Image (cartoon, grey):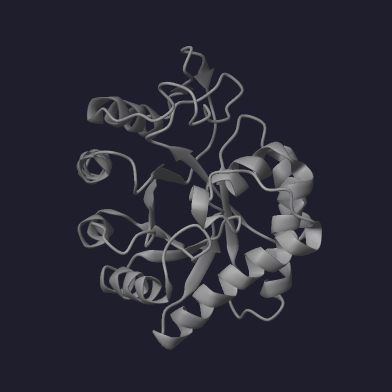
Amino acid sequence: MKLNCDLGEFKENNDADIMPLIDMANIACGFHGSDSLTIKKTIKLAQQHQVIIGAHPSYPDVENFGRQSMDLSQDELIANVQYQIGALQALCAVENAQLDYVKPHGALYNDMMKNLNLFEDVCLAIAQLNQSNIKPLSLMIQALTDIDKFDQIAKKHHISLYYEAFADRAYLDNGLLVPRTETGAVLTNNQDVVTRCQALLDKQPLLSKHQQPLQFHIDALCVHGDTPNALAMLKALRATINAQGQR
């Protein structure tokens, strides 16, 4: 199980401390946070620590950090996603780095997991870019108990999927995330996230907010870079995953 984190979102950050702890970096593309220089610095940092690079596009919503839903037409949505991925691809090319995958940010991510039409628009945006990519981009999405409908759409567009769970977010009984507007949506206690990580490593169900078991396959475990105590949380998770590999 790989650790991933959303990085490059702020000019002042602790990305240099976080990067050595993770396997995959979801790098902000400017529409919810970051800027061109911060993106370049984050790419270089990922290369230094041999971390897989992903694009982290969002709705064009800097004011709300990409965490407010927007009603965009299909053409607007696709163009916005492609613009952001393209910018990151260009900066990766300059640094001789490889862009591997796409993971939408915030409200765009949550919305596509609830709306199959929006999910297909995201897939279409990536598929059109992949026509000219030597290495096709994958798409990272939330692991769910019933993932078949997402698999079918992704396969139609010849896109491979990474499935992730969240170390620092509470879950609803249906497997989706508790909205950030609700109390307890973000987990900040290290022991809670380590317990969740260990359960997943042992192939045990993840428990919802109401202690309902959620069983699904995951490839990666995410910590948000702006979660309080994110660095200490990632250190604890890295140690847990490494210890599991030594058993």
Q: Residue 193 lies in what quarter of the image?
A: top left
Q: Residue 184 at x, y = what percent?
A: 40, 22
Residue at x 50%, y 25% (from the top left corner): 171
Relative to 208, 74 lies left or right = right
- Note whether residue 84 is visible: yes
Q: Is residue 242 above or below residue 204?
A: below
* Image quadrant where one finds the N terminus: top left
Residue furthest out toward the front:
63
Q: Is residue 241 above or below residue 139?
A: above
Q: Residue 44 lies in what quarter of the image?
A: bottom left
Q: Residue 167 at x, y = what percent?
A: 38, 35
Q: Residue 160 at x, y = what percent?
A: 63, 57
| The one of 109 and 201 positioned closer to us in this rendering | 109
| The one of 220 and 72 positioned closer to us in this rendering | 72
Relative to 229, 210 lies left or right = right
Q: Is residue 162 above or below residue 174?
A: below
Q: Residue 83 at x, y = what percent?
A: 62, 72
Residue at x 70%, y 46% (from the top left corner): 151
Q: Is residue 136 above or below residue 64?
A: below
* Image quadrant where one finds the C terminus: top left
Residue at x 76%, y 43% (from the top left corner): 116
- Note whether residue 158 is visible: no
Relative to 237, 105 lies left or right = right
| The one of 65 and 111 positioned closer to us in this rendering | 65
